[in-house]
Image (tube, helix red, strand yellow):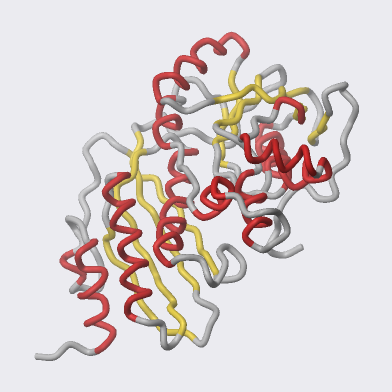
Amino acid sequence: MTLPPEFALIARHFRPLAGAGALDLTDDAALLDAPVGRQLVLAADAMVAGVHFLPDDPPETIGRKLLRVNLSDLAAMGAAPLGYLMTCGFTQGTPDAWIAAFAEGLAADQAEFGLAVLGGDTVATPGPASFSLTILGTVEPGRALRRAGARPGDDLWVSGTVGDGALGLLALTGRLPSDAHLTERYRLPRPRLALGQALADLARACMDVSDGLAQDLGHLARAGGCAAELWAAEVPLSASARLALAAQPSLLACVLSGGDDYELLFAARPEERHRVISASQATQTPVTRIGRFLDGDGVRVLDGQGTPITLPQSGWSHFA
């Protein structure tokens, strides 16, 4: 019997991605046994063309970014990936080759990060293209990292480098010279899963940076009922970001508030510094101490001389 077009598309491109419990994507839902002695962790993110990715981005990177931004949410809670559900809204007339490349990108990251699709939905839309992914992970009971927990006196740390994603978007839209590193960092975030799991007994609070370092730090401080001080001169930068800032110092605001970093931002006691560094080395994930938590509320951004910096905006908002 010939399959209806939607089901044929699913069978052709997404059934090869299905894992145990997905029932070969032939039923209305998946069946999944939670691992013994583990708590489930669930998160969801959506991506819309022209908002979260550029309409002419390579399709394989769009699928991978969709998965990776959700994996970053698991990393922020110290969780390990288990599987995911995905809803795809392809624009009407999307070529089959485009969908094939989208699925190939997902297959590559499924293999890298050790998970599989469990189900979802596929629809056609007049546009723009939009995608939503719900990810499932697991963590030992009582060991999930949370946003709440930072206390005055705690160190502020961040993984990797900051600002590459926001600068990459500027490069892709012609507002900065082309740069392969910055472009890749915008299109392909690096979820810090290993570091997140290593911080389970170290970080007092943790979240991933998606909407801007300064803004997300405000969320972390507010959840802990304290203030935070961010040392702009200590924020880790890639070689490409340093070159961009040297040419245009005003880009510092973009680095600190542009978003699309997907690095881990976390609080830890000062006496745990050596253990934080050990976790960084064991997971081969650089970390940098970029500030501290204080009594009070709000976020103060200071330059290298300790002078306050005023940012035009602290981060991204869909509803500003």
Say left or right for 48 vs 152.
Answer: left
- Count the numbered circles shown: 0
Q: Position of residue 308 (x, y in %)?
A: 89, 31
Say left or right for 116 vs 223.
Answer: left
Viewer-side residue, 45 vs 159? 159
**Is any part of residue 211 visible from this angle?**
no
Q: Position of residue 71 (x, y in %)?
A: 42, 47
Say left or right for 120 vs 155.
Answer: left
Residue at (50%, 76%) from the top-left corner? 129
- Residue furthest out toward the left: 1
Q: Is residue 89 above or below residue 185?
A: below
> Where, quadrant-wise, is the N terminus in this rendering?
bottom left
> Where, quadrant-wise, is the C terminus in this rendering?
bottom right
Viewer-side residue, 159 vs 121? 159
- Residue furthest out toward the right: 307
Q: Position of residue 201 (x, y in %)?
A: 45, 21
Residue at (74%, 29%) from the top-left corner? 226
**Is any part of residue 73 visible from this angle?**
yes
Q: Is residue 244 above or below residue 133?
A: above
Residue at (84%, 28%) from the top-left corner? 303
Q: Position of residue 126 (x, y in %)?
A: 51, 87
Residue at (66%, 51%) from the top-left corner? 166
Viewer-side residue, 79 vs 18? 18
For residue 14, which quarter of the picture? bottom left
